[in-house]
Image: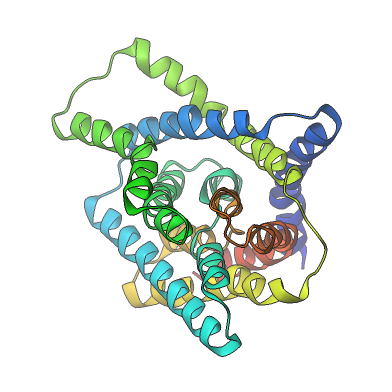
Amino acid sequence: MTIFVHIILKIMLPIMILISVGFIANKSLNLDSRTFAKLFIYVFVPAIFFSKIYYASVPLKEVWFILAYIMAIQVLMLVIAALCTRIFAYPRSKSVALGNAIMYFNSGNYGLPLADLVFKGLPNAITIQVLIMLIQNITSNTFGVFRASSANSSRRQSIRNMLEMPTLYVLAVVLIVRLFRIEVPEQILVPLKYVSDGFIGFALIALGVQLAEIKLDFRFGDVLLPCCIRLLLSPLLGYLIVLALGVKGIMAQSMVIGVATPTAVNTAILALQYNNESEYASRIVYFTTLFSPVSLSLVIFCATNYL
């Protein structure tokens, strides 16, 4: 019980305080969440991707483990969404919204700060979370965008939306730098470090700013299922996959905790942008974030004590 309380007070409470700062600031100062989102996507995420992968010492075998793990989780979530659609006779639009909501978890705004607090800045654990965020970013901005826009946009426009995201280009550059052992000048690394160091605080405040702009009603019944899938079933499946892969220690803990975060805010933004069950998607984001301190405290306790 003492460990559980420690997790809530030392890990979850600081996260929720920063999210609340962003939420309250937006409500009182009428901030523009689009500016925060653009800074996050085009400045902070590229900076932390480049710097963490540039300095990463994760063996290639572990990278393949993480890739296989995240893809397995996403495929399972997609299958579960399809089963729910058939059982409850959801229309296609609601099926797409449900699939995106349980497939794409908040690995950036929430997952990386969480990993930093849980593992106290341990480089390998943070790098694992960065890789999870990278894979999530790529799949959500390709397959996720395509799914969300497929009903109302052309395939060409969906591809154009994918190519506008900077993640793929940053990944290509840093892989070339690592492959050819190119030494990046200090004049570039120092600014990247400054931006990366500010990522955690900015990410959580930006999440609060985004949550404050979600149009919400408090009907909970139709989002109970995705909340349970996202917050409870996903880490349980993650635990089983980690056991199947034979991964242990910090890596296993980081991987399980990494897929236990709430639904990514971008799923609600995509649903709104492409007119695809935006109110339903927004409620899932809001309630999974609201309930995540309890579920994540349980997941962190189990992962750090039994993996």
| Residue shown at the point (77%, 51%) measured from the top left | 9
Quadrant in which residue 79 is drawn: bottom left
Please state if 229 lies on the left or on the right of 19 as rendered: left
What number of labels is visible?
0
Please state if 14 lies on the left or on the right of 108 as rendered: right
| Residue shown at the point (43%, 28%) measured from the top left | 47
Tell me where residue 258 appears, x and y as whole percent. Answer: 51, 58
Please state if 21 lies on the left or on the right of 192 as rendered: right
Quadrant in which residue 39 is drawn: top right
Q: Against 196, is 128 above or below?
A: below
In-front residue for pair 276/125? 276
In-front residue for pair 161/74? 161
> According to the image, what is the colour scheme of the structure?
rainbow
Residue found at the far right of this picture: 28
| Residue shown at the point (54%, 61%) measured from the top left | 257
Tell me where residue 306 appears, x and y as whole percent. Answer: 54, 72
Residue found at the far bottom of this picture: 87
Residue found at the far top of this picture: 187
| Residue shown at the point (29%, 56%) measured from the top left | 62
Quadrant in which residue 294 is drawn: bottom right
Screen quadrant of the N terminus: bottom right
Tell me where residue 52 appears, x and y as whole percent. Answer: 39, 35
Note whether residue 113 is visible. no
Q: Against 273, is 189 above or below?
A: above
Q: Against 18, is 104 above or below?
A: below
Note whether residue 84 is visible. yes
Tell me where residue 201 appears, x and y as whole percent. Answer: 64, 33
Q: Against 115, is 98 above or below?
A: below
